[in-house]
Image (cartoon, rainbow, N blue to C red):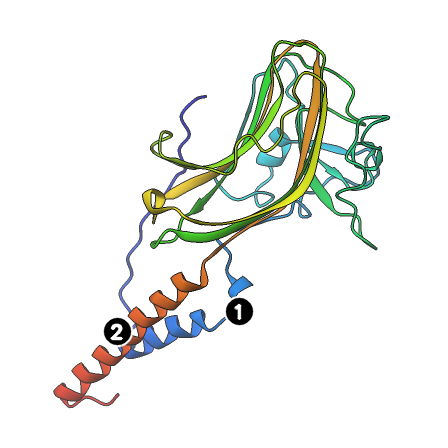
Amino acid sequence: MAARTIPSTTARRAAPHGTSPTRIAAGLLGLLALPAGAAPLLDVNFDNVTGLSAPGSVKTIQNILNTPGELPAGTTASQTAPSTRNINVRRSDDAINTSSWAVTMGFGSFFTRPGVTNQFLVLGDRSGAIGDPVGVGTFLVALPFVVPTLGSLTLSFDYAFNGLDNSSVDTDAFSARIVDQLDPLNFFDLMSPLASPAFGSGRVERTLDVSANLASLAGRVSYLEFKLVQGGSGTTSAVGIDNIRAVPEPGTALLLGIGLAALTGSAVATRRRRGDPA
């Protein structure tokens, strides 16, 4: 897979005249007082992808990446199958979701939510219920985010996998991992493979919820990678993904808060020694 880069800039701006270190630190402490879910590291549910106005609508990953704001900046995708339409976003009333697991190869309404028509990501299928074998192929989507400085986070997402492998040679497999942007050999494997049929049919639906300490990735720009591999000419499989969320562990925020509190106290003491008002 070709190397990926995310454009990045570093800007420094002096505090406005009259803004004390005490006030800056107090402002940062105020941010920490927000609810834990107020500022996730990654929060993607695909509902802001536009152009899906009717059941059966499909928007390919290429069109999504060409529409600013629909996925996190720096998101990448790749697929090696002949078609370029096998990674896409669909509605929950699409046939791939409403079809049963066994009869017509779907996700058995796993992504259906009461009273709403939500949207989700599909890897490995062009349109409708799962039914067009693509042969050997790899489908990958990578979402960038910054791992907390202390490396501790909680990651969750919903996924449904349905696969059929008649080749009796290679299995299809779905996996997920967190990968360093600059060093692909530095990664954290999220129970790979998450799903794989062994020369027959296989299906899995669940919510993955993992708490992890990513010491080797701490403070680094990384990718959450989702990958579906179809291993033989007799295979037909697909995976749906939704509700991706990564948040710092509470202990990370607590330790950061202690550090900021110390900064606040130090700033106050300094100003008092100088005779300045707090």
Q: Answer with the quarter of the image where residue 140 lies.
A: top right
Identify the residue at horizontal 62%, vertical 17% (top origin): 171
In depth, the one of 16 and 276 nearer the eye is: 276
In depth, the one of 21 and 170 nearer the eye is: 170
Element class at badge 1: loop
What residue sits right under mark 2 in the picture?
A: 263
- Residue at the farthest left position: 274
In depth, the one of 277 and 273 nearer the eye is: 273
Which x, y percent locates residue 256? 34, 65
Which x, y percent locates residue 121? 66, 37
Of the residues shown, which amino acid type is indicated by label 2? Leu
Identify the residue at horizontal 69%, vertical 41% (top origin): 120
Of the residues shown, which amino acid type is indicated by label 1? Pro
What residue sits right under mark 1 in the picture?
A: 35
Side (left or right) of 68 relative to 222:
right
Identify the residue at horizontal 15%, vertical 90% (top origin): 275
Circle 2 Cα neighbour tier, 10 Å, few/some/many (<14 / 14–19 / ≥20): some
Residue 193 in sight in this render: yes
Which x, y percent locates residue 98? 84, 37
Label annotation for residue 192: none
